Image: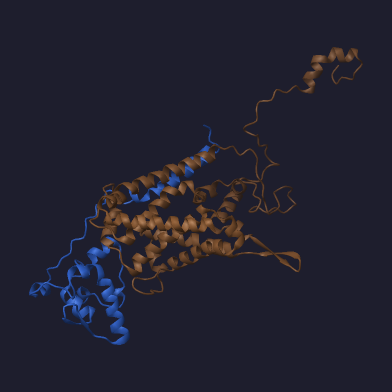
Amino acid sequence: MMNLIASLITVLIMILLALGIAFSATLSSLLTVVIPYAALAVFLAGFLYRVLLWAKSPVPFRITTTCGQQTSLPWIRSNPLDSPSNVWGVIGRMALEILLFRSLFRNTDVAIVGQRPVYGSAKWLWFFGLLFHWSLLIVVLRQIAPWINGLSAADGFFEIGIPTFYLSDAALLTGLSFLFLRRVVVPQLKYISLFADYVALLLILGIVSTGLLMRHFSPADLLQVKNLALGWATFSPVVPARIGLVLSVHLCFVFTLLAWFPFSKLMHMGGVFLSPTRNLANDNRMKRHLNPWNAPVKVHTYEEYEDEFRDKMKLAGLPVEKE
Amino acid sequence: MKLYNGGKIIAGIVVFLIVATFPFWYGRGKAVSPPDLKLDTPAIQRLKEKRCVETAPFMRSNHMKLLGAWREGAVREGIRSYTAADGQVFQVSLTGTCLECHSNKKQFCDRCHDYSGAKPACWSCHIIPEEVR
């Protein structure tokens, strides 16, 4: 409960700060000239730092959390996607994980029915998680890659309202609301939810809702937004005379998210590619994997031992392998 | 510092950097100048007071809302006249009122809309004046 309230207060303070920024010319120019590049630099550097940190950790063993038969004898049918033994299988498993969230699809739920635990499938998190991530991808692509033909047209297919209400926006809000509400409504989840869990969701929710607000209710000055974006992309940022209130909140949220991203749980964007239980082929029985941090052990084999003590062994009447 | 699977990690990082900095290198060298609207059609030049339905700043920020309201009023409720803030009455008609003065869609509407990437749905029903003549 404390975490939820603290995160809500944090986001509210951010909104107030953003509104304050919009009223001050100096702070507005800071927000549109310095902060965008600073946030992007922190994002890129932090992202690389995290990935390199992971890459520096040795993965000595193949962690084989599999749900299928591994490749062994030719007459035992193996499951190449659940327990891959080669690169192609791993690529297939990773693609299914990243594009379709296969692990989440296997979620189970347990309920006590008549004093006995009963296990059933639980697909809600998988469904709304997938909905959220895919619609977020479409929204981001619509923003930064308008040259993808037909994306906006397909997204706004039903032409609801002026300007068209995009289906991906509705899906994004639905997915986000579910992800947020499950941490508020389900007692067990509320108990384990941390401050950062709520803040991550609230930040994205804030970006989405201010974006929709600017599109449908209090239109942002599109020319100004375009000038701003072009200025950033060409490294010649323009300082607008006056920045809209909603736009200011939107930008503050975006830059906060960008700068905080590498240090938060959202780093699973890069981390998912490095999950050892997903990206390591189950080939423990085919290849010998040496532990990279093994200290060099000085071994003294039996052959060497016998060479050293053969005379003494013979004198003592002990059997030797080589005469 | 030792990287495990260094080749794959660096390949991944390169892909990430290319995608993440995409807006900076995409469209480099393609200079886009801010839109320059042409307000000198014969109909506008004949006007004594150069004024749209409402004031220019209002039209600049609210024309889409106004057109939306006109559309809904005219098509759904048959409201065909609009009283402006200064009391002038206009006929609610895109072709008859708006395009009467702004007969240069390419030099007027499209300049801003192309620049900012806004795609209004006007022309899925309405004809474009220049194409008729």
* Residue A27 appears in the rendering: yes
Viewed as shown, does residue A303 lie left or right of B128?
right
**Is B62 drawn above or below residue B25 in the view shown?**
below
Residue A263, image x and y in percent?
48, 46
> Residue A63 falls in which quadrant of the image?
top right
Residue A113, image x and y in percent?
73, 68
**How is the rendered protein coloured?**
by chain
Please name whichever residue, A47 or A110, is drawn nearer the observer in this view of the structure: A110
Viewed as shown, does residue A2 lie left or right of A72?
left
Q: According to the colouring, which chain is blue? A: B
Residue at the image point whose x is 24% and y is 85% from the top? B80
Q: Quadrant of the C terminus of chain A?
A: top right
* Residue A238 appears in the rendering: no
**Is B77 drawn above or below residue A248 in the view shown?**
below
Viewed as shown, does residue A70 lie left or right of A97?
right
Q: According to the colouring, which chain is brown? A: A
**Is A283 drawn above or below residue B33 in the view shown?**
above
Residue A279, image x and y in percent?
59, 47
Please name whichever residue, A87 or A309, is drawn nearer the observer in this view of the structure: A309
Residue at the image point whose x is 28% and y is 87% from the top? B78
Viewed as shown, does residue B89 lie left or right of A1?
left
Residue A230, image x and y in percent?
28, 53
